[in-house]
Amino acid sequence: GAGAVSVVLQRLLGCASSTMDVASLQEAPPSKTDSLFKSLRSSVSDPSTLLLACSQPSPAEGVDGIPAAQCLVVLGVVEERGVRLVRMRRVSGRVTWAGDWSPDSELWNTEEGQAIAGKHDTTSPTSFFISLKDFVARFASVECCRCKLSSSDLKRRTHLLSLFQEKPHLLKPGLTARQLTITAKVKADRVAAELLAEEEKKKKGKRKPRATR
């Protein structure tokens, strides 16, 4: 259940975790789903936050490929001309979502669909878009995990990430924009760790043992 996922995230990542209740919103007024969408948008904009959406424990009629009782990563949200979508990635790999806004959906041929496709990658085989309405119908909760990163860690990551973005040849070719960003963050974190280790080594080298009489 959602509680178990929250405990696992806290133990594995050492982060503060909270739960967004989604199941209770199926019959809720639009204002409640508006609040959920705003919370998702706010959370995904935070680089230290991981969002995992937990699907309903048993597949409902017309589930359209969403696996039961599994966690999918929330990559982002999109709002365009009154259309609200949630972009997701299945943790285990490829997805088979076949509902509205799936890769083969006719909705991509509409003006709204064309506008969204012009701003976002809609062809990835491992991620998909789902309407906010379908998201609420098929998911029970969203686990929000905020990793403990100090202000200095975030500043160092931001600085190193900007350096990698200025030199894209340092990253592997053929990756999507998001994959490039993730790869850059990994590289930035690795370099930061090496710099910290080097600094610590220099500090230890400067410490001279007290002379004994």
Image (spheres, helix red, strand yellow):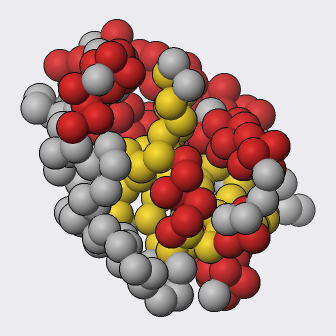
* Front position in the image: 156 or 76: 76
Where is the C terminus found, in terms of image quarters? bottom right
Rendered location of residue 103, percent (x, y):
20, 45
Tell me where residue 52 sits by quadrant. bottom right
Q: Is residue 5 above or below residue 19?
A: below
155 to the left or right of 66: right
**Res. 83 in view:** yes
Rendered location of residue 42, percent (x, y):
71, 36
**Res. 9 in view:** no
Tell me where residue 186 sits by quadrant. top left
Q: Is residue 91 above or below residue 193?
A: below
Where is the N terminus found, in terms of image quarters? bottom right
In the rendered image, the residue lying farthest to the left is 174
Rendered location of residue 212, percent (x, y):
85, 62
* Front position in the image: 195 or 75: 75
In the image, what residue occupies the spot 22% across and 26% down? 109
In the image, what residue occupies the spot 31% across and 68% down? 64
Tell me where residue 183 sits by quadrant. top left
